[in-house]
């Protein structure tokens, strides 16, 4: 079995057009999108969570667009993947999606489904 795997690995060659760094530049984590479009994402965090997000950015595309005593707003340029949605869900009520509406709706649906489990 190991010999078969070794032969496969020796014969495997990436296509000349494959650029791993470029393919994952706008991904969150290791999941690459299938047919997703690149999105401009705007998130609002409460002041406490905002301090954390400033000290440990979510992604290298993160830009601060508003930072005051009430909230931190950031903009990201990413593909919306399952692992990114799961990360956003971990912020619970400390974060709100301002753009795009489709992402806000996705998080709303997840939160609603979780809430209904406790009724």
Image: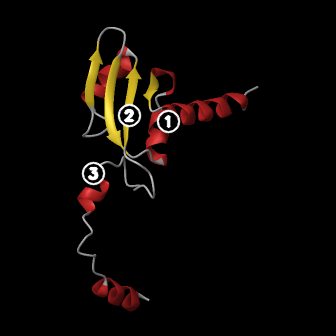
Q: How much space separates mark 2 and mark 1, taking CA atoms?
A: 8 Å
Q: Are marks 2 and 1 in contact (CB under 8 Å)?
A: yes
The residue sitting at 23% across, 74% down in the picture is 16
Q: How much space separates mark 3 and mark 2, taking CA atoms?
A: 15 Å
The residue sitting at 30% across, 58% down in the picture is 23
Q: Nearer the viewer, residue 116 or 26?
A: 26
Is residue 9 depicted above or below 84 in this figure?
Answer: below
Q: Quadrant of residue 4?
A: bottom left
Residue at the spot of label 1: 103
At label 2, counting other C-alpha atoms closer than 10 Å, the crowd grade (few under 14, some 14-19, many 20 or more) is many
Q: Extreme right residue here? A: 119
At label 3, counting other C-alpha atoms closer than 10 Å, the crowd grade (few under 14, some 14-19, many 20 or more) is some
Q: Are marks 3 and 1 in contact (CB under 8 Å)?
A: no
Decide if residue 52 is on the left or right side of residue 98: left
Decide if residue 3 is on the left or right side of residue 63: right
At label 1, counting other C-alpha atoms closer than 10 Å, the crowd grade (few under 14, some 14-19, many 20 or more) is some
Q: Nearer the viewer, residue 99 or 86?
A: 99
Decide which of tag 3 and tag 1 comes sooner along the chain: 3
Residue at the spot of label 2: 41
Callout 1: SS? helix
* Relative image position of residue 50 (x, y in whole percent): 33, 21
State the mark number for residue 72. Answer: none
* Relative image position of residue 57 (x, y in whole percent): 28, 33
Callout 2: SS? strand
* Relative image position of residue 47 (x, y in whole percent): 36, 14
Residue at the spot of label 3: 25
Q: Nearer the viewer, residue 2 or 75?
A: 75
């Amino acid at each position: 079995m190991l010999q078969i795997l070794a032969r496969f690995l020796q014969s495997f060659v990436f296509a000349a057009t494959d650029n791993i760094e470029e393919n994952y530049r706008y991904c969150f984590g290791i999941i690459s999108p299938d047919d997703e479009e690149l999105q401009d994402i705007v998130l609002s965090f409460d002041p406490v969570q905002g301090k954390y997000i400033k000290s440990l950015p979510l992604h290298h595309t993160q830009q601060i667009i508003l930072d005051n005593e009430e909230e931190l707003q950031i903009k990201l340029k990413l593909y919306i993947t399952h692992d990114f949605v799961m990360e956003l869900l971990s912020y619970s009520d400390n974060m709100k999606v301002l753009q795009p509406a489709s992402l806000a709706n996705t998080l709303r649906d997840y939160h609603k489904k979780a809430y209904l489990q406790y009724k």
